[in-house]
Amino acid sequence: VQLQASGGGLVQAGGSLRLSCAASGRTFTTYVMGWFRQAPGKEQKFVAAISGVGDTYYADSVKGRFTIPRDNAKNTVYLQMNEMKPEDTAVYYCTARSRPPGGGSWYSFRYTYDYWGQGTQVTVSS
């Protein structure tokens, strides 16, 4: 599986941005898709994930502002970011998990994902 992320850029605080992640492979519909981000000098952190049946999971820091829709016909997952804040500035990474959802907070751990795309830079100016 190959993942191609796009849509990063510069946005003012309070604005919106939508990231896209196009996936190759015929079993996309069964994959859990997710987004992580890494701010300068910090570790990579979970942002959002969506299961093959549409269950969604969000980090507390983005809940209510970000959504993670997927379009199975286009093999694409999105990250819609609204009410953006300077602390959202980071490199955003798309990821995919071929196994079904697990138990606990499985979706928030990097090691539970199998495939990673290249990052896309998002910068929010104050």
Image (cartoon, rainbow, N blue to C red):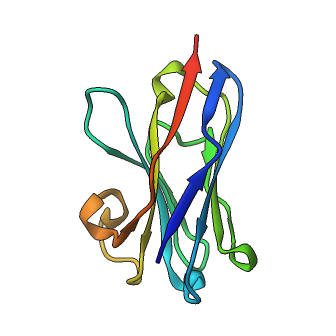
Q: Where does residue 38 sit, x and y in percent of width and height?
A: 36, 38
Residue at 40% x, 77% y is 101
Q: Quadrant of residue 15?
A: top right
Q: Where does residue 47 sit, x and y in percent of width and height?
A: 45, 47
Q: Furthest-right residue in view?
A: 73
Q: Furthest-bottom residue in view?
A: 26
Q: Quadrant of residue 16?
A: top right
When the figure is inspected, residue 36 is found, relative to residue 95, above or below; the finding is: above
On-image quarter of the C terminus: top right
Number of numbered discs overlaid on the protein picture: 0
Q: Where does residue 48 sit, x and y in percent of width and height?
A: 49, 53
When the figure is inspected, residue 6 is found, relative to residue 53, above or below; the finding is: above
Residue at 75% x, 79% y is 73
Residue at 46% x, 23% y is 87
Q: Where does residue 79 sit, x and y in percent of width and height?
A: 61, 50
In the image, 8: left or right of 59?
right
The residue lying toward the viewer, choosing from 46 and 91, is: 91
When the figure is inspected, residue 60 is found, relative to residue 106, above or below; the finding is: above
Q: Furthest-top residue in view?
A: 126
In the image, 78: left or right of 59?
right
